[in-house]
Amino acid sequence: MTEKELCDKLGIPLSEVPHKERIRELMAWRNEWKLYHRTCDKSGEKIISAYAADAPFKVYKNEIWWGDGWDALDYGRDYDFSRPFFDQYADLQKVVPREGTSVFNSENCDYNSHVRMSKNCYLNSLAVEGENVMYSYWMVKDTDVVDSSYTNNSTLGYECTHGEKLYNTIMVEESNNTSDSAFCYQVRGCDHCMFSSNIANKSYYLFNKPCTKEEFEEAKKKYLNGSYTSWKEAMAQFATIKKSTIRRAANNINCENVTGDHMFNSRNCENAFEGKDSEDVYNSVSTGDSKDLYSIYSAGWPRCELIYYSSVSRGCTDCRFCYYCWHSNDLTYCDSCSSCTSCFGCIGLRHKKYCILNKQYTKEEYEALMPKIVEHLKSTGELGKFFPHSLSTFSYNETSANNFYPLSKEEAIAGGWSWREKEKQDYLPATIPALPENINDAPETITKEILACESCSKNYKIIPQELSFYQKMNLPLPRFCPTCRHARRLSLDNPLELFNDTCPKCKMQIQTSYPPNHPETVYCDACYLEAMN
């Protein structure tokens, strides 16, 4: 199905916004990392929230927001054909309560963003079925993992990215089915390897050469001895290894007719990134078990179908221009709606049908009014556009958009977004002059200290379970705040964009996420697999 065919099916015009800008717009509606202390506007309780205390709308504690103590229909109003729709929507947005954080069915996971079915997790974003996971991003079924991104089914990991089925790994990137290894890049089916890349099914490898068990253990003692000095030396060695590593043009596994990067078990996808089990997905980021999607940020888990220009859809079908909707069908310009059908311009509804601007209608009334609204949207030039930047419930630098498409304050404001200034209380002087050089010298009282990031000066702390992890793994204490560590990991990824290139070995034309004039050696799939040792 082409984009035009999908738009015709959904009854909307084809968007004229460039695809890259669509993704930026969608990401600019999602705060994935920043948390605040504030008060629940219903109960008066102190809560952790994705919304700052001065947010211009009500914010409820999660249990209250999902409870029966309030009804979003109470805020309904008539559609006013004398005003633009987005102005009316802005008025509704100011009064409907919002959910504090997106944490579901989890135990001891209050200090997280977008976490489900997890236990004892701290300061993660987008984690599912995790346990004892800390400071990590886009994690699925991981246990005892810290400071990692995009890993699945992994245990005992530190500073790992894009990994599947990793065990007891440190700084292992773009790898799978690997255990007891450290500082490795693009390895698979390996164990007891260090400072190696482009290898498969190897045991006891050091600097890409076979080694004895004794040589491997000696290297571990040298570089993973709890010393920060040794850690920095290991990082420098790893950077050198990566420079000479042959890269795969696109990290797509078990895919058919797919262009993009980090796609798995998918078919007929174009310009798609970070997805799995997807079919007919176009110009989208983060999709799972979904079909017929165009211009999407985060859809699936469970399955989504026929979604256009929307952000964060779960179990939805036949939706356009929506944000954060669950198990719903036939929604247009809706936000935070769950188990709803045939709704337009609604916020916070649950188990509702035939609603417009949170007002209930009969099926006949709804079907008679909607064609008039569509004509009104056409006359105002609003139909086919995502929500205006000014309506995002977060400032640009609070959202994932600033991670993937960074802007300066001036650029963001010029683009119509808002900007949040630094919180002064997050930049207090550290209570100790310096962290101990070796984890073995770290006292238990370190968890009571206020630390300052060596990069941005923002305060952070070491929590008790985190200290235990570093002691168990013989790792030095981190010198940077979680935000800067997260930014470093994101910087390892290529842009969410494809470029034309040529495989230097076979001269075949390829598409890759490595930008023009990149220094890395990038091979086509066939040459890359041939080069793997």
Image (cartoon, rainbow, N blue to C red):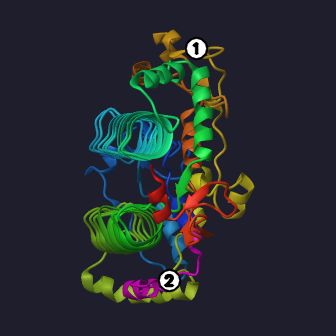
Q: Position of residue 210 (x, y in %)?
A: 45, 34
Q: Amino acid at mark 2?
A: Phe
Residue flagged by tag 1: what amino acid is it?
Pro
Is residue 292 magenta-colored?
Answer: no
Q: Position of residue 174 (x, y in %)?
A: 46, 48
Which quadrant of the view contains residue 382? Answer: bottom right
At 65% across and 25% down in the image, what residue appears?
Answer: 428
Residue 92 placement (x, y as % from top left) = 46, 64
Range of the magenta residues? 1-22
To which residue does mark 2 refer? 81
Residue shown at the point (66%, 33%) measured from the top left? 424
Q: Is residue 297 left or right of residue 141?
A: right
Residue 40 occupies which quadrant of the picture?
top left
SS at mark 2? loop
**Reading the chain from its start, which is encountered first: label 1 or label 2?**
2
Q: Residue furthest right?
A: 410
* Residue ID for mark 1: 436
